[in-house]
Image (cartoon, rainbow, N blue to C red):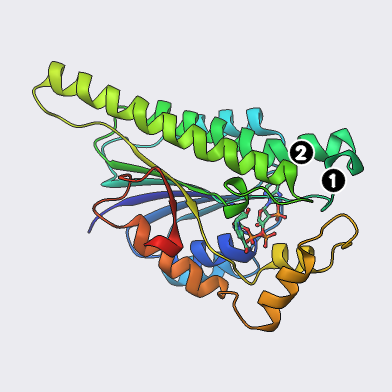
Amino acid sequence: MSQRLVIITGSSRGLGAALAEQLLAPGTVMLCLSRGRHPTLSAQAAAAQVPLEEWPRDLAHSIEVADEVEAWLRALDAQRFDEALLINNAGVISTVGPSDGSTSAELASTLRVGLEATILLTAAFLRATGGWRADRRVLNISSGLGRRAMAGSAVYGAAKAGMDHYSRAVALDEAHRQAGSVEHSGGRSRAARIVSLAPGVIDTGMQAQLRASDSAGFPSKALFEQQHAQALLASAEDAAARILAYLARDDFGSHPVDDIRRS
Ligand SMILES: NC(=O)c1ccc[n+]([C@@H]2O[C@H](COP(=O)([O-])OP(=O)(O)OC[C@H]3O[C@@H](n4cnc5c(N)ncnc54)[C@H](OP(=O)(O)O)[C@@H]3O)[C@@H](O)[C@H]2O)c1
């Protein structure tokens, strides 16, 4: 049976919870990171005989969490896995509205969870698994708001734009590394693949937060209300299924910045 390692952030609810549930399959070892716990994931994992670690962690403390994950990865049997996946899904909008309406602590936390933790976890994952034989993939859950500016979401959008550009550059680093590895090892590919993927509009707590925000600081509030009223939001389950099909594709990584609506 094929052996797969999965690390996923923001697995307690919303899209991350649906992704984690659908990733529970025999042969998988899973590490989940969020402050809260998914209400039923451990029971589902036990039923599927999937070894599951759920670490209650605040990703705003990104250095400590990334160091801990790296140490955990280094203690695993490197030759055991055929696939190793990191899904940076956790994200936070904090206060919707102009950034000067938020405290410095709120703004820093949004950036730490959305961007800093993504970068530190990706680097830790690539460092720790560099010598593994596994097919290594990093999926960063981005947003259209990182590509199209929207009033009221400047810091959230900045974190996602940073995530996109980081992913583009890491893909180049990995391609460069692969070219060197081909030169020095006679063709063995060790490059990891990475994609920053906009997941579409999904019916989660984050959307509810946008609809509940004050329109004075968020002129697009009506658009989100309209999309909800017209039932245009994907369920977390459907979005997760589409994203996992994308993650499994042979050409994963060919577009380091992508949108599920184009796939
Ligand atoms: N919903 C959409 O329409 C939509 C559209 C585009 C992009 N996205 C992206 O999709 C991803 C998932 O969003 P969602 O809609 O599922 O949001 P959500 O329902 O609000 O869930 C967010 C997840 O992130 C975790 N998280 C937040 N702050 C955290 C922290 N400090 N430390 C650790 N984990 C933290 C939460 O867990 P805890 O609170 O338990 O820590 C939760 O599991 C996000 O990256 C979001 O930007 C969503």
Q: Nearer the viewer, residue 252 or 128?
A: 252
Ligand 1 shows up in the quarter that is bottom right
Mark 2 close to ligand 1, CB under 8 Å:
yes
Compared to residue 150, the image places residue 138 above or below, namely above
Q: Secondary structure at mark 1?
A: loop
Compared to residue 108, the image places residue 263 above or below, namely below
The residue depicted at 58 percent of the width and 40 percent of the height is 161
Q: Secondary structure at mark 2?
A: helix
**Is any part of residue 72 visible from this angle?**
no
Q: Is residue 62 left or right of residue 8?
A: right
Tell me the residue that label 2 is attached to.
Answer: 109
| Tag 1: amino acid | Pro
Q: Is residue 137 left or right of residue 184?
A: right
Which residue sits furthest top?
184
Q: Nearer the viewer, residue 228 or 67?
A: 228
Query: Badge 2: few (under 14), some or many (20 or more) residues near its Cα, within 10 Å?
Result: many
The residue depicted at 23 percent of the width and 53 percent of the height is 250
Q: Nearer the viewer, residue 51 or 237?
A: 237
Upstream in sequence: badge 2 or badge 1: 1
Report x, y in % for residue 148. Answer: 61, 49
Tell me the residue that label 1 is attached to.
Answer: 98
Query: Badge 1: few (under 14), some or many (20 or more) residues near its Cα, within 10 Å?
Result: some
| Tag 2: amino acid | Ser
Report x, y in % for residue 116. Answer: 63, 33
**Is any part of residue 254 visible from this angle?**
yes
